[in-house]
Amino acid sequence: MNSWRSGIIVAAAFAAGCLGSVGDDAAESGPGGELPTGGGNGSSGSSGGSTECTPGISPTSQIRRLTNAQYDRTVRDLLGVTELAASGNVAPSTLLATDQAGSLTDLGWSSYRSVAEMIAAQVMKDPAFKGRFLKCTPSGDGAACLHDTIIEFGRRAFRRPLTEAEVARFDAIVAKGPEITENGAPEEVAEALLYMFLISPSFIQRAELTETPDGGAGRFALSNHEVASRLSYMLWGTIPDEALNQAADQGQLSTQEQLLAQAQRMLQDPRARQMVAGFHRYYLELGENTRWDSAQRDTTMFPLFDRSLIPIMAEETERFFDHVVFTRGGAFQELFLSPIAFVNAATAPLYGLDPADFGADFQEVTLDETQRPGFLTRVGFLNAYSSYNRTSPILRGVFITKDVLGVDPGTPPPGALETPLPDGADLDTNRKRVDAQTAGATCAGCHHSYINPPGFVMEAYDAMGAWQTHEASTGAPIDTVADVRVNGEPVRVTSPADLMAKLAASPSAQRQYAQKWVSYAYERDGHPLDSCTVNDLAARITPGGYTVLDLVTDLTQSESFRTRAVELE
């Protein structure tokens, strides 16, 4: 479709009333999209969210735009298109504006139109793609086939049945085919029709417009189709499948039991594994332009280091979480306690294993549980949270304090990051040097009480994650004993395994994990009115035996999942 023709089509569409307006609110975060900012909330040394809660429903946007990742997955599942042949085979969202809240700019709107034009042309040139759009072969003027396509494809693209008025407006586009296409041929009109669907606000947005009152001012019960869309985008990051669409059409998404049954079914789909993996990347702060992919090491001190190890370490970590959640059906506690690892010849030496026993592919192994329980003892995390030529108790300690325990130590005071690491004959371990570096009055409060202690316990691993008992440069013994604030009060911790056990049993760590799941799944970052849901999930984690998949399905059971609320003036 030439760009001059797309302009004519849009003009015709406006004349037919086929286009509304794309709303102001972009998706904030969540499955398949940009993530919530995460971390603790509050001031220095404060707990990441109060355990007190006020029952209520967090206000949500009625017109949330698809995130770029959701857009790609939606186009993939609708049409099979994953790359734009007309633009160097990049993913469609590569040409869209970055995910952001606020009004859609003219440039942003133009990018949606350009991408839609490319997709529509590509689909109509490829028989496999075309078969996912047209379920019939146009004959004559093609109007009958295209009318059926409007109803069938529109149902999938809009995640709900089209209204009679919408069908009439799309039929009007078909009727204008000779005017808006070069030759008026049915396939040209079909391409124009697909283009119109792809730039429709009902495709680009996940609108929730039902206004059925639900027990309070500003609260509305979602329709079955809106619930189906929430389910599919939360669990898969894409459109509902046929079974979910059928359930919505039949009004079978109205009860908690019905939602639970669908969620349990949907978690068996490989797309759910992708969603859970996405959550754990968020939990770990793992991804592009993070500590995980930017590590550098002094190879004179760490000769095993090679940049090619970085993606291997990250993949091993992701395999660990997938194994615990899906293969083992494990609970939160197992994330900190499991000695299972996935090792290849490149990482084997870091675990004290013989690389000759491994190849390039990962092998599942059981490590020494006294040294390697849980994800924080895997080389991926340990390598990411280290410095160029030494370990970093501060980086490791901040992650455990803030991201695992939900305690925000606050922002370093001005100039703190430039504080030099001291030397001295009596400073024969990295721990002693860091302790002296952070002893100043402006640093000690946070560092000595919150940040340093868990980082000191993790000194049992060097800057690449290998186990160490003595300082490499001085031969001084490594001291891993520290008083760590696990639940607000300092407790004596003697080793990494001891720390992992205490984190696994920590109500603070359990609540932080639940908080991050709620933020990620509900696509909003730590809203106070979600606190009751967080508390309920955290309470279920505490006794053990409550699997991560149980937690995910229970996210569909909260009142806020089935209800929309608006801000009251």
Image: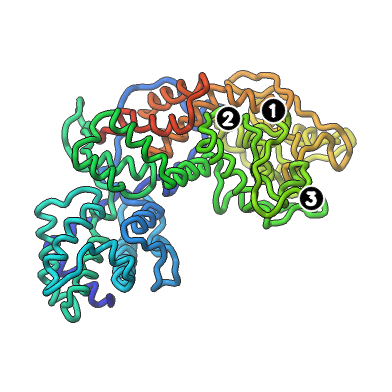
Between marks 1 and 2 in the image, the one whose residue lies nearer the viewer: 2
User: Is disc 1 placed on a helix, strand or loop?
Assistant: helix
Which disc number belongs to residue 334? 2
Image quarter for residue 55?
A: top left
Circle 3 is placed at which residue position? 302
Q: Is residue 454 visible?
A: yes
Question: Is residue 234 or residue 56 the one in the foreground?
Answer: 234
Circle 1 is placed at which residue position? 497
Q: Earlier in the sequence, mark 3 or mark 1?
A: 3
Name the amino acid, label 2. Glu
Name the amino acid, label 3. Phe
Between marks 3 and 1 in the image, the one whose residue lies nearer the viewer: 1
Relative to 471, is 54 above or below? above
Gap between marks 3 and 2, in whole Å? 31 Å
User: x, y (%) of residue 330?
Assistant: 53, 31
Question: Is residue 71 or residue 389 the one in the foreground?
Answer: 71
